[in-house]
Structures are given as C-alpha cells and as structure tokens.
Image (tube, grey):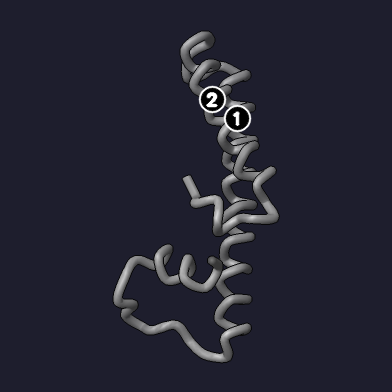
C-alpha cells in the first residue's frame, strides 16, 4: 500500500484500507466473490483508496508549490524516493 511517511495526518485512512482489505479477504472466503457483503466491503475499500489517492495528489502538489519549483520531468529515481527526501 502507500508508505506511511506520505500520509502522516491520514494514518486513519491507511489503517481503514488495511482493515477493509482484511475484511474483504475474509468475506470472500466465507461468502464468495459475488455476495452482497463482499460487494459492500469492496465498495467501501474503493472509496477509502480513492480518498487516499486524492489526498496524496494534494500533498504532491503542495510539496511542489512549497519548494517554489517544478519536479524534474524525468526524475532520477522513484517518485516515492523523491517525496521521501522532502518529507523526512
């Protein structure tokens, strides 16, 4: 999933995604892939993951704005590594 250092204020969302994933795995093993319970948990998991992605996008844009410049078009490393340098 997403590294915790990218989501310091939203560890609740990250934890929610982790717990929903565990619940989804359990529901699939008990009720199967097509049950209402499994579908409901999956819908909630998708919503939480979307919220995390939106928040991460906001954080990336805020990081670029706060540094007063643009990130390289072709970063020399992994994008996560680039942001990790700024957030640690």
Residue 87, picture quadrant: bottom right
Vertical arrangement, residue 5 with respect to residue 41, above or below: below
Residue in view at x 69 percent, y 55 percent = 9
Mark number for residue 8?
A: none
- Residues tagged 2 and 1 counted as in contact (Cβ below 8 A): yes
Image quarter in which the C terminus is found: bottom right
In the rendered image, which residue does mark 1 sit on?
19
Residue lying at 62% horizontally and 38% vertically, measured from the top left: 15
- Image coordinates for residue 65, horizontal then vertical, percent: 61, 84
Most foreground residue, 43 or 83: 83
User: Residue 53 at what x, y percent from top left?
Assistant: 56, 56
User: In the rendered view, does 42 fall on the left or right side of 73?
Assistant: right
Badge 1: residue crowd in 10 Å (few <14, some 14–19, many ≥20): few
Q: Secondary structure at mark 2?
A: helix
Horizontal placement of 61 versus 76: left or right?
A: right
Instruction: Decide: is 56 above or below 38.
Output: below
* Residue 27, quarter of the rendered image: top right
Measuring 64% from the left and 55% from the top, which residue is drawn there? 8
Residue 49 at x, y percent in the picture: 57, 46
For label 2, the residue is 22
Residue in the picture at 52% in, 16% down: 26
């Amino acid at each position: 999933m997403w590294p915790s250092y990218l989501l310091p204020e939203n560890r609740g969302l990250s934890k929610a995604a982790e717990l929903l994933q565990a619940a989804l795995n359990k529901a699939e093993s008990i009720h199967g892939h097509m049950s209402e319970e499994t579908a409901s948990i999956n819908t909630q998991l998708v919503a939480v993951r979307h919220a995390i992605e939106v928040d991460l996008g906001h954080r990336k844009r805020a990081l670029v704005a706060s540094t007063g410049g643009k990130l390289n078009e072709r970063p020399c490393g992994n994008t996560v590594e680039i942001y990790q340098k700024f957030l640690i």
